[in-house]
Image: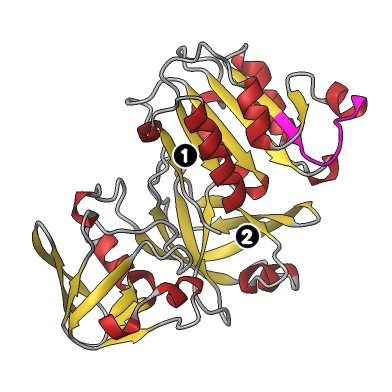
Amino acid sequence: MHTVLIRTPSGTTSYQATADERLLDAGLRAGLCMPYECATGTCGQCRATVLHGQHRDLWPEAPAASKLRRERGEVLLCQTAACSALELALPKGAERMAGPQRLPVRYQARVSGLRLLNADIIELRLDLPAPMDFLPGQFVLLGVPGVTGYRAYSMVNHVPATTMTLLIKRRPDGGFSNWLFQAAREGMRVDLFGPLGKAIFEAEAMHDIVCIAGGSGIAGMMSIVGAIHAQPLRGTRRTDLFFGVRAAHDLFYLSELNAMAERSRGQLRVTIALSETQPGPTLINRYPALHFAHGFVHEAAMQGMRPDLETPTAFLAGPPIAVDAGIRMLMKQKFPLQRIRFDRFG
């Protein structure tokens, strides 16, 4: 074990990390306020400066590593391990972050099932040795043999269970998706760390909800919407969900969404946005409880949000370009920034 001392403008704190543990994971596991967004080496939000001590770079080719000023000792906490006692400095503002809502833990999980939802998205089911305590909207990190680095995926589940469901999108140059799509992986073991993420649904603090998701970003929205509407009508909270894909052949989870919308008696309004094709009558008739639109998902949200929602909180997920477009749209609609939540993985 190595002692890691963290310096911020408002004070210092410390925690213990093993020699093979990522500094971010160890700090979050200890319940500390640590800066991060993706936790996979993509966004660069977990940047810190090494003041003293020896460390090891776990993934020098991480996408965000190119943004680092190595000559100043900058590292990514999510891709760095301690080789000795370390002293680090966090940037201004990091100490004001909230600590983890749920302390993350590490599991060895087993792949228990795979279901192809469309040509590019697989539903992955994992068996856990014990239920993971998480909040709707959070995500986990997955590591697999032979693939460098971890990947972030939101839970489709809305309650902790010993089975976890995730969505994996095929990417042409994606190490993990190639690992999954190119061979049968049932029964294999994967490394799981979580829960993580700050784009969480908090039932006691929130009223009406807007969810805007593109493609596999629907995973975390299924968790949030399921927590609110999976059971027969309870309470008065309303949800507007907008799910965008390119064409009808890219769609999935419509039966589940249609069933929840029917049970909600108008409390859940689901709009499916197709950006490249018009929704046909067969699709519309098959899912009578759903609404359909032609255009990008943020455009459908701008047109379709109910104007009488009470102090709504908005959740966004999907490709970074779609999340950015959704945020701009919401701000034009006078949404307060503190009521816009997202975790951007790409």
Q: Position of residue 246 (x, y in %)?
A: 78, 44
Residue 193 shown in magenta: no
- Amino acid type assigned to the residue bearing label 1 in the image: Val
The residue sitting at 73% across, 19% down in the picture is 289
Total marks shown come to 2
Please tell me whether mark 1 sits on a helix, a strand or a loop.
loop
Residue for badge 1:
159
Residue range (magenta): 272-281
| The N terminus sits in image quarter | bottom left
The residue sitting at 84% across, 44% down in the picture is 249
User: From where the camera sits, is residue 223 visible?
Assistant: no
Residue for badge 2:
112
Residue 279 shown in magenta: yes
Please tell me whether mark 2 sits on a helix, a strand or a loop.
strand
Q: Is residue 258 above or below residue 118?
A: above
Q: Are marks 1 and 2 in contact (CB under 8 Å)?
A: no
The residue sitting at 56% across, 59% down in the picture is 346
